Amino acid sequence: MAGSDARALSRALLDLCRSRKLTIATAESCTGGLVAGALTEIPGSSDVIDRGFVTYSNDAKRKMLGVKATTLESFGAVSKETAIQMAVGALEEADVDLAVSITGIAGPGGAVPGKPVGLVHFAVAARDGRIVDREFRFGAIGRSAVRQRSVLEALRMLMELARGPQPPAKKRALASSVRVARSPRRKAATRPVKKSVKPKPKVD
């Protein structure tokens, strides 16, 4: 099921990006290139997919994606901060419109205090400045299952940003309040107009 879901998502994502003339790069750690593999399995993906970075080691994350050594030392390879820098680094290095990153602990080993097996951090960066990051704790469901579910989530996040920015909530609320404010004026306009009465002339 996961394989068919990944194929369906990959096709939908490629079609959307093709219609919007968007290009993609991937930056993967625990998935080892599975996201790029899912996308490039679809014929004709070369007009959307530019490249994929498999940065399994910290050294690769620094050299290939520009992740700061201080980030890795302070937060670790499996962290929100590292995922964001991976995505931004891939975006800049590949000069594409969208980039996704994945870093996590697929298991069965590798867990540390506060970071259990199944913890995965994702980030997607867009050329227009949007960045979305998410944390998932899939649990000890098996190495293969963690990796497969990570691929699906990465594809969903790419779809989200590929659709484009949504109107800010404040603007939508403002538009709603404006419509409400207009209704009393429309009602007032339908009220009958009172005729003015001319004063009678005074008689001396």
Image: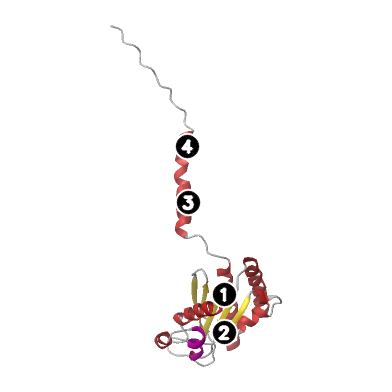
Q: Nearer the viewer, residue 41 or 9?
A: 41
* Magenta span of residues: 59-65
In the rendered structure, find residue 187 and report the number of the disc placed on it: 4
Q: Main secondary structure of the magenta part?
A: helix
Residue 87 magenta: no
Q: Which residue is mark 3?
A: 176
Estimate the x, y position of residue 3 in percent, counting from the top left. Answer: 67, 80
Residue sticking out furthest to the right: 43
Q: Which residue is mark 2?
A: 53
- Quadrant containing the N terminus is bottom right
- Element type at mark 4: helix
What crowding class fits label 4: few (fewer than 14 Cα within 10 Å), some (14-19), or many (20 or more)? few
Residue 60 magenta: yes
Q: Is residue 66 left or right of residue 10?
A: left
Q: Are marks 3 and 2 in contact (CB under 8 Å)?
A: no
Look at label 1 and name its amino acid.
Val
